[in-house]
Amino acid sequence: RKEVEQDPGPFNVPEGATVAFNCTYSNSASQSFFWYRQDCRKEPKLLMSVYSSGNEDGRFTAQLNRASQYISLLIRDSKLSDSATYLCVVNMQRGSSASKIIFGSGTRLSIRP
Amino acid sequence: DAGVIQSPRHEVTEMGQEVTLRCKPISGHNSLFWYRQTMMRGLELLIYFNNNVPIDDSGMPEDRFSAKMPNASFSTLKIQPSEPRDSAVYFCASSLDSWEQFFGPGTRLTVL
């Protein structure tokens, strides 16, 4: 089993729709979580961190479920510009300075007019 | 502010040649990461440094790959000898205390 798993998609949804992705992780010692966005032929960029209490940034909501070991990303009122690959990232802290960072393989989202 | 700088942006070489990729992290960041991305395998962490010290190199594919970080502002990833299966986009990223990672634009490597 992969340490971080995502549905590769593609998710093809109409503009204005709400879409949600999940990402599961295998290590219960995982400490911090992030969603990154990667546009075609570009580098990944941080979209948002995921906090235990859940957090919202405009149309984007991220949630963490430690009991079931998954994080989610919800996009409301989707825009054409949301089309990208969304990468789930899990950071497992080891000791005071070392950590292991695992990227999921990404979920492709395509918004159609 | 300058982000992570990588060079070259594109590299085309022949099998058997040595390839050196370079990275300048964001000033003040203490962690540096090298990744490789392909369609088949996605984004793979090759190695990361904390305070210029290699912490985890378990992702380095084989002895043909080596990475160095001689100081806080420079790192190299070397492939010697290169093979066609090394063709990929290589990203360097830096962060402060392993939180948000800032990625460079990547080096697109093609080994013929």
Image (spheres, coloured by chain):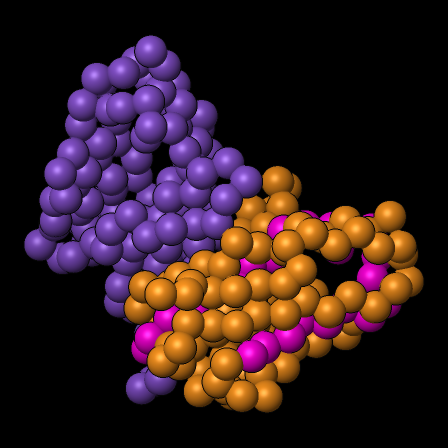
Chain colours: A purple, B orange
- Name which residue lies at 40% across and 23% down: A110
Q: Is residue B29 visible?
A: yes
Left or right: A64 with respect to A112?
A: left
Residue B94 falls in image quadrant: bottom left
- Compared to residue A36, the image places residue B58 above or below, namely below
- Name which residue lies at 61% across and 40% down: B39
Left or right: B86 with respect to A48?
A: right
Q: Nearer the viewer, residue A14 or A27?
A: A14
Left or right: B100 with respect to B54?
A: left
Where's residue B32, x and y in %?
Answer: 48, 74
Where's residue A28, x and y in %?
Answer: 29, 63
- Name which residue lies at 77% across and 74% down: B63
- Compared to residue B50, the image places residue A108 above or below, namely above
Where's residue A108, x and y in %?
Answer: 43, 32
A65 drawn magenta: no
B86 drawn magenta: yes
- Compared to residue A97, the image places residue B35 above or below, namely above
Where's residue B9, x and y in %?
Answer: 64, 54
Report the magenta residues as a range. Answer: B74-97
